[in-house]
Image: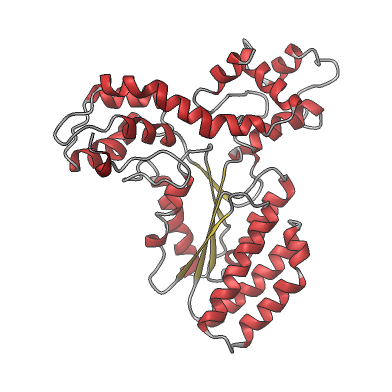
């Protein structure tokens, strides 16, 4: 195996050779730029996907869509609370403005505003983040160069702070000022209460032709039709698993990647996915949340109402989001382990999550 040439690698921060099936995202970024260029009010753009669903890869495609006379400011939110992410983004913006013109009054005033509100920003308070962002957006306008904030992995466990950051960092564009924000999150899109939300769905079999077949063929590895079908089946269109299956099946130059070679790597790829994506999420949950997930995994009819009945709590807890079970459901939706369009119909979105939960019973 000529591993050195393999452009596929599964893992956090790994970007595939081609980002496919995300045209709706790039159209949304184009629209944001069009709005800002015409001084039209626009919300922050929120890209929501499952853990390992390709948010970072998509975000890294954004800079070429930003005009050359603009500056891009990137912030990694991994390991930070939502308020701390906002603080990091605003600190980076202040530093960038000061670097352009250290003696200009606008950046100095903006920095003073940031310092005075820092405690409230770190606490995730919407008004503080909004006020400071608006002040910085004015400084950006005065500087003559627009800025685009790219914020990756906004933590969603604190509902109020999560939405406050989205609203706050979008305060410049909401006023038609040349300060945009594109933010990624693993929160269920149906729960995101601010910004223009774009859901990143699993990749289709058609998408795999661009994501897998073309880059592999460019490097002299033909990918057979049955290999694409096997990847689609076993990955369920999930980018992390697609990368893992291709990396594990990489062949010597000129040798095709077949369905048989993909099928041989499925157990290894799925085990790596469980270890990297599923187990850490489960380990961070309360016993009540684990109990709820297991009930979802074993329910005949997967709804919040049926899960409540299965847990024996149907008299104490209804489908109301105000119930204890309702809060547990939404906690799981905020950490990427559960999806629901309407709050009642439920699905386990991560490949292999149901089997992992059943194995523990």
When asked about the image quadrant of residue 233, the answer is top left
Question: In the displayed structure, would residue 31 be above or below residue 213?
Answer: below
On-image quarter of the N terminus: top left
Q: Which residue is drawn at 57% across and 80% down?
A: 98
Q: Position of residue 227 (x, y in %)?
A: 27, 25
Q: Is residue 90 above or below residue 85?
A: below
* Relative image position of residue 328 (x, y in whole percent): 74, 30
Q: Is residue 124 left or right of residue 336?
A: right
Q: Residue at x 64, y 44 (%)?
A: 192
Quadrant in which residue 216 is drawn: top left
Asked whether residue 174 is in view, the answer is no
The residue located at (60%, 52%) in the rendering is: 195
Residue 332 vs 112, above or below: the answer is above
Residue drawn at x 53%, y 85% is: 101
Relative to 250, 196 lies left or right? right
Give the residue furthest to the bottom. Answer: 103
Asked which quadrant contains residue 43, the reply is bottom right
Where does the C terminus fall, quadrant-wise? top right
Q: Nearer the viewer, residue 32 or 215?
A: 215
Is residue 201 in sight in this rendering?
Answer: yes
Percent from the top left, x then y, of residue 265?
Answer: 35, 24
Whether residue 170 sits left or right of residue 127 in the image: it is left
Q: Where is residue 136 in the image (x, y as percent from the top left)?
A: 62, 73
């Amino acid at each position: 195996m000529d591993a050195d040439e393999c452009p596929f690698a599964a893992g956090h921060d790994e970007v595939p050779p081609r980002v496919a099936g995300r045209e709706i995202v790039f159209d949304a970024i184009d629209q944001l730029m069009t709005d800002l260029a015409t001084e039209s009010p626009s919300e922050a753009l929120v890209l929501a996907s499952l853990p390992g669903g390709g948010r970072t890869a998509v975000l890294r495609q954004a800079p070429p869509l930003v005009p050359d006379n603009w500056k891009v400011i990137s912030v990694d939110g991994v390991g930070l609370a939502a308020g701390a992410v906002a603080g990091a983004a605003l600190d980076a913006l202040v530093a960038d403005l000061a670097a352009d013109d250290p003696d200009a009054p606008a950046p100095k005033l903006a920095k003073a505003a940031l310092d005075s509100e820092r405690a409230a920003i770190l606490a995730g308070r919407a008004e503080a983040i909004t006020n400071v962002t608006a002040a910085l957006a004015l400084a950006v306008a005065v500087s003559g160069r627009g800025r685009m904030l790219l914020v990756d992995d906004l933590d969603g466990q604190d509902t109020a702070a999560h939405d406050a950051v989205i609203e706050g960092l979008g305060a410049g564009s909401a006023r038609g000022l040349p300060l945009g924000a594109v933010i990624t999150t693993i929160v269920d899109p149906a729960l995101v209460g601010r910004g223009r939300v774009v859901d990143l769905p699993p990749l289709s079999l058609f998408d795999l032709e661009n994501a897998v077949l073309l880059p592999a063929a460019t490097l002299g590895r033909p990918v057979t039709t049955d290999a694409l079908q096997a990847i689609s089946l076993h990955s369920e269109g999930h980018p992390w698993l697609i990368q893992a299956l291709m990396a594990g099946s990489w062949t010597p130059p000129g040798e095709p990647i077949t369905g048989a070679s993909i099928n041989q790597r499925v157990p290894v790829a799925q085990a790596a996915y469980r270890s990297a994506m599923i187990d850490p999420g489960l380990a961070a949950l309360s016993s009540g949340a684990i109990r709820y997930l297991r009930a979802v995994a074993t329910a005949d009819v997967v709804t919040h109402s049926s899960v409540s009945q299965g847990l024996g709590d149907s008299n104490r807890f209804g489908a109301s989001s105000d119930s204890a079970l309702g809060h547990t459901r939404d906690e799981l939706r905020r950490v990427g382990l559960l999806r629901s369009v309407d709050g009642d119909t439920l699905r386990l979105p991560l490949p292999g999550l149901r089997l992992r939960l059943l194995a523990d019973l």
